Image (cartoon, grey):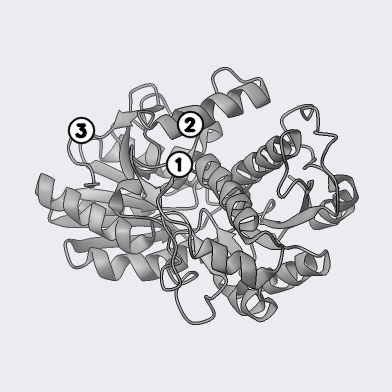
Amino acid sequence: MRPVALATALVACLAFAACGEDDGGAAPDRNKDLTGEPIVIGLDEDSTGPGASYSTIAGKTIRNAVERLNAEDGILGRPVELVIENDESDPTKAPSVIRKLLDQKANALILVTASAAVNQAKPVIQKAGIPAIAPIAISQTFAEPPDSDYAYSLANVLSDFVKVYCGAAESEGYKTLAILSDDTPTIEGVNGLLKPGLEECFEIVADEVAPEDTADVNAQVAKIQKAKPDAILVSSVGGNFEVLAHNTLAQQLPDTQRFSLASIGNQPDIWKLANPAALKGLVFMGSIDHENPKTADLEKTLRERRGEDDYSVTAYDAQAWDAVMLLKQAIEAAGSTDGAAIQKALNEISGYEASFGQTGFTLTFAPDKHLGADGLCGLVLTEFGDDNKPSGAWGAYQPPC
């Protein structure tokens, strides 16, 4: 994971494609017919701190997408340049990171950082008049007023999560819920939006918080056990905390249904850290359905690019890839790198077939709709099998499309 200084130093090598320590191997041949000034995409990737567990996954795929563009027709027949900064998982640093990217002449922005960070960046983006997509953010406040004229998101937002969790509760007869959270600012913000909605369909009988870097959650899990909930939600940025939580919950409450946010399902590197079968039966809020042909195409592309025949595409991959391709579509429709022209073109994109979600899920923008998801079927409740890997869609309940 790259610190800020190194990320800044790498800018010079990004004139015609992304590069970096995690670029997945040698870049494909670049199209030598691309001419003119590069079109610059600025990337805020919180590659250090708690957010690195998910941002670097999306960041790697953005690099792959830019490489693909530069191997083919670029954008408007011009090469694409990727410039990168790191907000260090600190929302207060996001505005200065955006200013740095704008100083590097970014024509559009992609923010693969926490919801709290993208919300802090909104006023800077609005003032600059440069379109910004936050593809993995699940807070609806980024793409809604105020200061949202140039702010766009792709993923289903937390209000959609609530509808799906409540649908599952009604389907399965769950009445009581316990929540176990890490103490990161990201999750504090997520819970602030999530819990009021959950209280409409659950009685929250335990609400426990532990440090993100803790080595022991036995005390918190003991309180949850005493509350005897029908279901448990682990609300976490993922990483070691989430593995620890599920190792402990599987041991102390083996028969209680566990739910999770999207994080653990999109972090394959941490699955192997779980105890044998500790993730079995865990249901996370996923966005990947391998029956979706767009998802299958992206997985094939990433496997070929990275030389990893067993790579399993994540929602972070799919949402990051779609962000780059949506910007390409908008800039080409605008015929310009002018921020207002790109904004107008984004607002006219309708029915874009997403690389994530259930088959047929689409993204649409309009002047008064900057939350791209068209319905709940961008979400897929996904269950882990006894091998601690996702086994597919949860059979008990799925959000309608």
Disc 2 residue type (three-letter): Trp
Select label 1 or label 3 by which is in front: 3
**Residue 212 position within the rendered picture, expressed as x and y whole percent measured from the top left:** 53, 55
Front in this rendered view, residue 322 or 172: 322
**Residue 258 position within the rendered picture, expressed as x and y whole percent measured from the top left:** 28, 43
The label shown at residue 395 is 3
Query: How far is the residue under mark 2 from the one under mark 1?
Result: 8 Å
**Residue under numbered circle 2:** 271
Task: Give the side of residue 311 with respect to residue 188, left or right.
Answer: right
Specify few, some or many for label 2: CA neighbours under 10 Å numbering under 14, 14-19, or 20 or more. Answer: many
Residue displayed at 69% across by 52% down: 48
Q: Earlier in the sequence, mark 2 or mark 1?
A: 1
Front in this rendered view, residue 384 or 9: 9
Do callouts 2 and 1 mark residues in contact (Cβ within 8 Å)? yes
Do callouts 1 and 3 mark residues in contact (Cβ within 8 Å)? no
Q: Quadrant of residue 301?
A: top right
